[in-house]
Image (cartoon, rainbow, N blue to C red):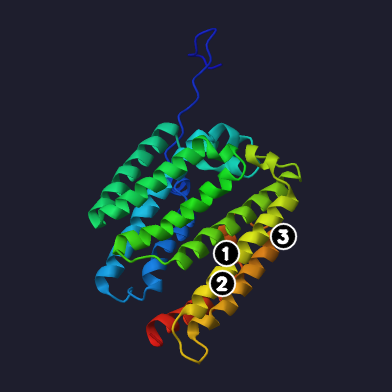
Amino acid sequence: MGPWAQPGRTAAAPAPRFSPRALLRAVRPRQWVKNVLVLAAPGAAGVLSHAHIAGECALAFVCFCMISSATYLLNDVHDRHEDARHPRRRSRPIASGEVSVRLAVTLAVALMVGGLGLAFAVRPALAGVAAGYLALTGSYTMWWRSVAVADIAAIAGGFVLRALAGGAATAVPLSRWFVLVTSFGALFLVAGKRYSELRESENGAHQRASLRAYSAEYLRMVIGVCAAITVTSYCLWAFQRPHGDQLSWFELTIIPFVLWLLRYALLIDGGAGHTPEELILSDRFLLSMSAAWVVLFVCGVYVAG
């Protein structure tokens, strides 16, 4: 007790020092790569070469970076006490006290308002999708995260809404195959994330509530089913593209697409999928298959088309 402290009272804890680097970490810029999905629909439609379409996609990307960062901040505020007990998540800026709750909430509100305003300026339909994303992620934080199956469906829904946002921002219609591939591909990734978290919890790590309802066998089944539907839907889409009697560029994209899924399934079987975006960006084979798919797809859309 210092010489100026009054008897019977404890000195107040010092307020956390403001750190721009900690605040940047709190908005999770590494996860902005997920928002590249807004390019999927206009890219598949072959209209990204149009300047106004590219501009609308860029604004949609910025919009979803803003609102997704807002949801990360609010989620971390809600989970700060639980995260503080987790061996990996306790280093998050809000859980560790590097970023105050007041600052996090204030920034989250500003990002939500700004993101929705930007979305409405691009196209009202985009604002509707963005509002739906906020409603879904908010309900996930409050309820669905504790309900098995609903939790993975809600997270996958966030990926699907990102893809829908690209169509809404550019008025590009979405095919049934696009929606199926996006939906079950997202479920594949999220089930893999849950599988890795379950493997991690078996080693003594803190376990989230919904994981108690899952078994490794069940999650492997979900991963297999989602992968099968994703590949089947993608192949049906590729084979239905007009190409005559010759092997088309779109059919060739099936090869890196399937190899990518097989490699990712192998990695998550080893327990390495709890952060999908980091895994994808760190594995050379996944990156090379992604690059091969992009080259073949671009040739199919912009060269052969």
Which residue lies at the image location 49% right of the left edge and 51% below the top edge? 157
Q: Residue at x 52, y 89 (%)?
A: 247
Disc number for residue 293: none
Residue 166 shown left or right of residue 253 in the figure: left
- The label shown at residue 287 is 2
> Which quadrant of the view contains residue 46?
bottom left
Q: Secondary structure at mark 3?
A: helix
Q: Position of residue 284 (x, y in %)?
A: 61, 72
- Looking at the image, which residue sits at the far bottom? 245
Identify the image quadrant of residue 265: bottom right
Name the front one of labels 3 and 1. 3
Q: Establish if 207 lies above or below 219.
A: above
**Label 1–label 2 contact, CB within 8 A:** yes
User: Three-letter amino acid code at disc 2?
Assistant: Leu
Lower sequence index among marks 3 and 1: 3
Numbered label attached to residue 280: 1
Q: Looking at the image, can residue 274 be seen? A: no
Mark 1: secondary structure: helix
Amino acid marked by disc 1: Ile
In the image, residue 154 lies at what x, y percent? 51, 47
The image's mark for residue 269 is: 3
Where 7 sits versus 13, above or below? above
Which is nearer the N-term, disc 2 or disc 3?
A: 3
